[in-house]
Image (spheres, grey):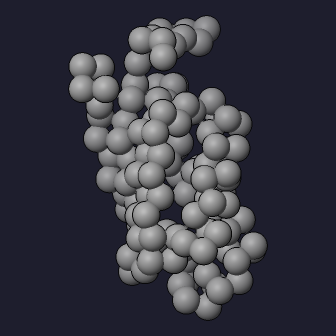
Amino acid sequence: MNKFKSNNNVVYSCKYHVVWTPKYRRGVLKDGVDTRLKQLLHQIAKEIHVEIIEMEIMPDDVHLLIEVDPQLGIHKAVKRLKGVTSRYLRLEFPHLKSRLPTLWTNSYFVSTVGGAPL
């Protein structure tokens, strides 16, 4: 793992621990939903140039350790990850529509991660 990344304008190391939950913290991320969610997260991250360093999907929450280009920003990255996964998971798993008005809560937890603890 390289210590720094770069684009045309910035050399950076911006790592974040991000956590979000399904609406009402329902334990719906199981029975194949978790596997598909992992696939979708990797696909979306690749499209928006976000590196997923670690990922843990529990039945009632999602934990990611990600590196995000500061020009994209953590809010836009999380918004895209949550928005696209919600759309596709609710299309592919109809039972998610009947149990929840929306798949994800509106909020999320984010914390910066320094280089030393990694």
Q: Position of residue 53 (x, y in %)?
A: 48, 33
Please identify the residue farthest to the bottom as the structure is shown: 98
Q: Give the residue drawn at x 67%, y 60%.
A: 36
Q: Is residue 86 above or below residue 9?
A: below
What number of labels is visible?
Answer: 0
Q: Give the residue drawn at x 29%, y 34%.
A: 112
- Left of 116 or right of it: where is 77? right
Q: Give the residue drawn at x 67%, y 51%.
A: 39
> Which residue occupies the foreground of this view, 43 or 118?
118
Q: Give the residue drawn at x 52%, y 36%.
A: 52
Q: Position of residue 18 (x, y in %)?
A: 38, 47
- Left of 79 or right of it: where is 47? right
Please identify the residue farthest to the right as the structure is shown: 92
Residue 113 picture quarter = top left
Residue 74 picture quarter = top left
Q: Position of residue 2 (x, y in %)?
A: 48, 12
- Left of 95 or right of it: where is 10? left
On-image quarter of the C terminus: top left
Residue 113 visible = yes
Residue 73 visible = no
> Which residue occupies the foreground of this view, 53 or 109?
53
Q: Position of residue 72 (x, y in %)?
A: 54, 31
